[in-house]
Amino acid sequence: MQRPGGLTRREFLKLVSLIPVGVYSRPLSKVASAMQGNGPNIIILVFDAWSQHNTSLYGYRRHNMPNLERFADTATVYHNHYSTGSYTVPGTASILTGMQPWSHRALQLGGGVANRHAGNTIFSALSPTHSTLAFTQNKFADLILHQADADLDRHADYWSFNVQKTNVYGSSFLEKHHRTSFASIEDNLVQKGEGYDSSLFFGPLSRLYTLYNRFENTQQYGNDYPLGLPDATEFFLLPDVVDGAIGLLKGIQQPSLTYFHFYPPHEPYTPTDDFYGSFADGWSAPDKPIHDLSDKKYRPEKLNVERQFYDEFIATWDQEVARLFRYLNESGLTRNSYIFVTSDHGEMFERGELGHWTPLLYDPVIHVPLIVSSPGQTARQDVHTLTSSVDLLPTIAQLSGNPIPDWAEGKLLPGLGGEEDERRSIFSMDAKTNSSFTPLVNYSMCLTRDRHRLAYYCYPEDQYEKFEFYDLDADREELRNLYPSRPSLAVEMQDELLQKVAEVNRQKQNNDGY
Amino acid sequence: MDFIQKRFPRRYDMLAVFGVVVFVCYSWTLLGFLNKLSSFLLYFTLGEIANILAFMMAFALVESLVLTVILVLLSAFLPSDWLREGFAFKGFVIVIIATVTSILFQNILEDNFPHPLVLLLFILIPIGVAVALIALVRSAPKVHSLINNIQDRVLIMLFVYVPLGVLSLMFVLYRNLTY
């Protein structure tokens, strides 16, 4: 019987039967388009909590990264690269979305990119031409990666290469809504470390099992790690992670966008026996006054010891990650790939603060390394102009032959298609106590420009408001706050910063969508 | 049927113990949720917070059922006068002791596995206290009746907590199976 639409019932049923084929062949069609492409691979290596201040490549007095220095011999080294945030969530979200924290709104630990921007990532920008692979060891970065799952061909689980496999939420089928199931289970029903589990009986039993598992792992592998095993809230061994990353790279479908976010040198600092004590050289960093906003107010002696362990852990990681650099070279990936090595944020050992869980925005916690190896690059190039972590996405989109997405807020990196802009303004901020849904009220923000930095600490809830202004050329350690004398540049930068806050708050108020 | 009547506690006794278990598990979970709520409000939408609450309530229901089943099975396998006879008040005492023990135990758990002696004490002392309290309650009719009264009142919470748990469980299953 002929239907009005021109199809018989038999023909219609045949067509319907093809629907599953269409649905399931989507990944294959993507592979096919990737195979046709001849664009370069993009490989992003993020080392968590890695400060430029503690990296020998950038002139740090302790020679802790000889292998990175060798890698940089044939790469472009960015000397003034800044993260938009002072810890994982905002820093990682900016790398992945190319947006400033006030736009992507991933501001708090456990927070994610605002729903209306969740699909706007480096993976969606490159997925038309590249296969996509992502892996992070950091749970909080993993929650952000999960928001991009629709554009990921492969998303390796964060615990893939851990020796401790005791996560509750990851092994559950309830994991499908990652942020909420994480908040319910891992961050609530079962506690990590001190505190009360919201599950009265299962919680402590699960925690006891986890602690026993950690005890067993320490017994088994602890000899090589005098300060304890590397711990991304679950134990892992550095060689396993590098081997795992190499294994993942062996399986990529070229051209590929690969994002690896490694936990080292994030605290706890756990150098191996080979490096433990290797920087016990008696050197102490300059003493700096304890800041009003410092929570723990650690003494300089403690900070110096921790800095030494951090440096030793960086050296340990450098030795291990050298195998990855070697693999990239020997496999030929360096000849057809742009390799970005950077960090989501830095680390602080000063002013009473240890680590990066701080509202303070001094150079060590936001000034991060960026080294980019281009295909076939044979000589080192140095770029000294200011760059930001939001610049990675537009640069990578352009390098891969894709259009620069209209949501991207960064610029093309100089040396990779962009122009040097000596007058550029770079913002970094922390707003972990501010709601993601409201205008900025409680926050720290700094503006770096013209070799100066203006930092603004705005915490009306604590009745605290302060401006600081530093000359980064004459006072690299940021010890002399010039703001009280109100130099004209400070006033100019203050206006710019406050105008920016007013602008983003106005946009937030006018656009209630989240 | 005869075996079940012989080995398992009376239905009302089981319900009374289930009521106490539900009360402590749900209340503790809600307390934990409320502790986190202020930070959740910073970065979760109300819908997402409702989803988190559903996860937790569903979990509390499963936890309550598992604990009650363990107690019922114990009563079936242990000699009858150890637990099955007077299951309601014995179960009440055991659940309360277990709750206090769990809270104290959570307080001492930190980053390292506790010393085996500490673990042993956390097992032996609660058992000793439970046995002593059961003996005390048995010989004190007033306390016994007080426990009965408490259990009767706590049972009312079953009508609130259990439907909340069932609805939450259905919601969580639906969301995850249809994702």
Image (tube, coloured by chain):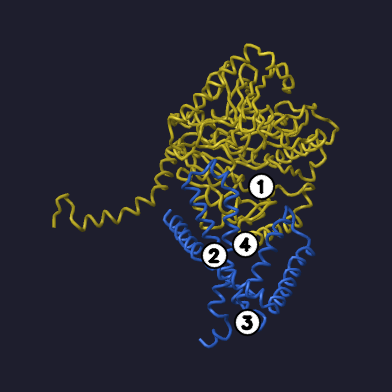
Chain colours: A yellow, B blue
Q: Position of residue A235 (x, y in %)?
A: 68, 51
Dot 4 amino acid type? Phe
Up the image or down, A335 lies above or below B122; here it is above
Res A43 seen here = no
Quadrant position of the N terminus of chain A in the picture? bottom left
Label 4 Cα neighbours within 10 Å, binned few <14 / some 14-19 / many ≥20: some
Residue at (52, 49) in percent of width and height: A180
Of A329 and A442, the residue lying toward us? A442
Q: Secondary structure at mark 2?
A: helix
Tell me which amino acid carries mark 2.
Val
A354 w.r.t. A213: above or below: above
Q: Nearer the viewer, residue A17 or A297?
A: A297
**Are the residues flagged by discs 1 and 3 in contact, CB closer than 8 Å?**
no
Q: Tell me how far mark 2 sits from mark 3, CA to CA.
A: 26 Å
- Of residues A7 and A364, the one drawn nearer to the viewer in this rendering: A364
Q: Which residue position holds label 4?
A: A202
Query: Quick check: A348 above or below A229?
Result: above
- Which residue ends up furthest to the top in the rendered image? A488
A500 horizontally vs A233: left or right: left
Residue A241 visible to the viewer: yes
Residue A271 image position (x, y, % from top left): 76, 43
Amino acid type, residue under disc 3 in the picture: Glu
For marks 1 and 4, the one nearer the N-term is: 4
Q: Which residue is mark 1?
A: A232
Q: CA distance from mark 4 to mark 3?
A: 27 Å
Q: Position of residue A85 (x, y in %)?
A: 60, 32
Would you identify the image quadrant in which residue B88 lies? bottom right
Q: Are marks 2 and 3 in contact (CB under 8 Å)?
A: no
Label 3 sits on a secondary structure element that is: loop
Q: On residue B85, which mark appears?
A: 3
